[in-house]
Amino acid sequence: MKALAFFNTSRIGKKDIERIGNHLKKRGIEMALCDNYRSCEIKDLQLVLTFGGDGTVLKAVPCALQNSAPILSFKIGSVGFLSAFELNQLNEAIDSYLSSSLVEDRRALLRIESALGTEYALNDFVMERSKPSRTIYLKVIIEGFSPYLVAGDGIIISTPTGSTAYNLAAGGAIIDPASSVYQVTPLSPHNPYVGCVVVGNSRKTTIELLDDRGYPLDCYSDGVYAGRLKEGQKVEVILSRKSVILLRPKEFDFVGVMREKLAFGGRLRDDFQKR
């Protein structure tokens, strides 16, 4: 069996990587390392492994998608919404995978079409100003609806998986990861009545850069720089039929993870205890 591994080398050293490789080898798994996250393709690849935080999982998505392989993730970091196991659970997780006892958590991807090419994102696609203190003007056209304008710092298009990432910090909605929707969230809009819009999976959203004030728009797909767009150019986004599989020991408890990672509902803890 062949597995492709992604490591956050700022959090894990060479000796630990060798130790992990030896553990896998004892269980009949040949581990290969991936340095170029966009083009690591291995014949007969069956599993993608990640060791790091959510960013490491996101970097593994293109390869998992290209090779039709599930992702088994190990958290080495702080938040870790996407990671299913701690590093000290390596043997337990691998044994569960080999015995086919892990749950497949299927997550939808965004498909983004623009002059930069085609991108797929598990979390989000972000368009933001490249020059501080320069307002940009965007036209948002959600298929079947009237267009509207956004004047501000930019815009975030996020999946339900990415709803708790940059989208949440920008005032977007928290969405059940199993939902078949995506959302469009403005960044620091000058019009306070322009908020996030949750869009059905069958509707395409087109965003046109009306005025860049002389500075191109920076674009990021799952936190990775994708390039710049100029005035007059458009981005088309829709929820793709493609998806990736995150392997977990049990069904994903979305609220439980938010309580643990974000202190969701924490302010009422004392009140609840009194009741």
Image (cartoon, rainbow, N blue to C red):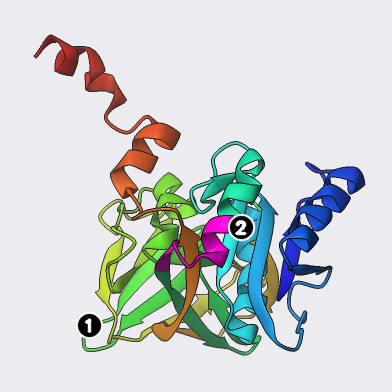
SS label for mark 2: helix
Residue 259 — which label?
Answer: none
Q: Identify the image quadrant of the N terminus.
A: bottom right
Q: 240 or 153, which is in the foreground?
A: 240
Which amino acid is tagged 2?
Answer: Ile
**Could you tell whether 64 is left or right of 96 in the image?**
right
Residue 98, by quadrant, is bottom right
Whether residue 129 is visible, yes or no, is no
Number of other residues with Cα within 10 Å of mark 2, as a class: few under 14, some 14 to 19, many 20 or more = some
- At 49% from the left and 83% from the top, the residue drawn is 111
Question: Mark 2 = which residue?
Answer: 94
- At 78% from the left and 41% from the top, the residue drawn is 11
Image coordinates for residue 149, horizontal then vertical, percent: 35, 71
Residue 146 — which label?
Answer: 1
Q: Is residue 190 above or below residue 148?
A: above
How many numbered markers are drawn?
2
Q: Nearer the viewer, mark 2 or mark 1?
A: 2
Image coordinates for residue 41, horizontal then vertical, percent: 75, 84
Instruction: Look at the image and say whether residue 244 sits in the magenta stretch.
Output: no
Instruction: Look at the image and say whether residue 104 sits in the magenta stretch.
Output: yes
SS label for mark 1: loop
Which region shows up in magenta?
94-105
